[in-house]
Image (cartoon, rainbow, N blue to C red):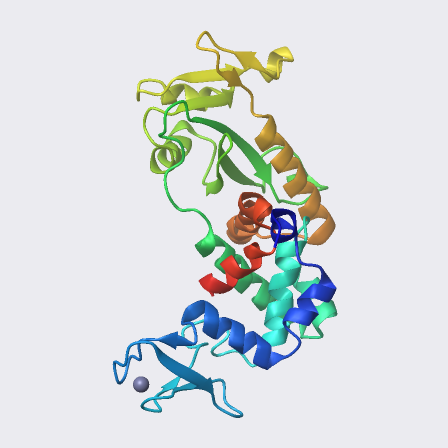
Amino acid sequence: MDKKHHTRKMNVREFFKRFPDDAACLEHIMSVRYGHRHTCGKCGVVDATFHRLENRKAYACSHCGDNLYPCAGTIFEKSRTPLTVWFYAIFLFVSTRHGVSGMELHRQLGVTRKTGYRMGMQIRQLMTKADYQGLLGGMDEAQVEIDEAYVGGRRKGKAGRGAEGKTVVMGMWERNGFLRCKVVPNASQLSLRTEFKANIAPGTVISTDEWRGYSLVIGDGHAHGTVCHGRGEYVNFDDAGYRHDTNSLESFWRLFKASVRGTHVQISKGKAEAYLNEFTFRQNHREMGQSMFDVLLAAA
Ligand SMILES: [Zn+2]
C-alpha cells in the first residue's frame, strides 16, 4: 500500500465494503482490542486462538472454551444500537470538517433524536480520550501559540454581543505539533495562567497577541513574543528570529465558530469543551487519514 493511499480518508463505499454488517464490526473490535491469537486470560495458554460464537457478541478460547466479549467495557457494550450504526456514526465524525450534530445522526442513521444526541456526545468523549494528553512544547526551539476566543451564546439580542452569555476558551497550539483547547471560567490572568502551567512545558517560546493576561508568562523561563493586532500587526519577528503570530489559532476559531453556527443550533456552556475537543481531535489527526478511525475505535 503506498503512502498516499494509506493517509487518504476512507470514502463511504470503502467504509461499507470494510464494515458490511455487525459481524465485520465485531471482528474489527476483537482484532483491535485482543487480536485473534493471544494469551487466554482463563487457561493461560499463550497464543491461544479464539473463534466466534454464533448469535452472540462473543468469542471462545479454542483451548478451554472460555468466553470473551470484545465489546465489554466499551461504549458498545450496553447499547441497543447495532455496531454498524455506531461505526457509521464514528465514520461521519472523522470524515467531516464541520462537525456532526445529534440531529444529523438522527436523520442519517435513523435513530431517535435523543439517541443521536447521546451517541454524538459519547463519540466526542472518545475523541477527547484518544487525543494527545502530554505537555506541549519543551523541546529545543519549541514554540506555542496562545489565543483565547469567545464561543457560543445567543447571536442576537441582549446576550449576543461581547463576552456576555459566551464561553471563554483558551487555545494552545505547538507549532508543527498538537493543538489543545480549554474552557476557562473567564479571561483573567489567573484562569489563563492555570491552564498555561498545566499544559505547557517550561522553557517553551510563547507567541500571543497583545492581551495583557499573557504578560504573566514572563518570569517562568519562557521567551515570549507578541503581535499587536491593535496596531494592525499580524506577524512579528523577535531578536532571536522567532516568528510570532496567532494566525493558526485564529483560523481554527473561525472554522469552529462557523461550523457551530452551521451545524448546531446552539451549544450549551457546559458542553462547549466536548465540541471543541471534537474539532481539536480532527485537527491533530488530520494527516492520519483512515487510521484516525481506528484510533477512535481503539479508544472505545
Ligand atoms: Zn483458554
Q: Is residue 207 left or right of residue 19?
A: left
Give the quarter of the figure containing the N terminus.
bottom right
Give above or below for 258 relative to 127: above
Give above or below for 42 relative to 123: below
Q: For residue 108, which quarter of the picture? A: bottom right
In the image as oriented, which residue stretches furthest toward the front?
Answer: 1
On the question of residue 168 being in view, the answer is yes
Camera-nearest residue between 45 and 52: 45
On the question of residue 81 being in view, the answer is no
Where residue 293 appears, x then y in whole percent?
A: 57, 59
Where residue 201 appears, x then y in whole percent?
A: 34, 32
Give above or below for 17 relative to 123: below
Report the residue at 43% width, 30% height from top. Answer: 188
Q: For residue 51, which quarter of the picture? A: bottom left
Camera-nearest residue between 195 and 238: 238
Q: Quadrant of ligand 1?
A: bottom left
Where residue 167 appears, x then y in whole percent?
A: 54, 42
Q: How many marks?
A: 0
Q: Is residue 127 left or right of residue 151?
A: left
Where residue 282 appears, x then y in whole percent?
A: 58, 48
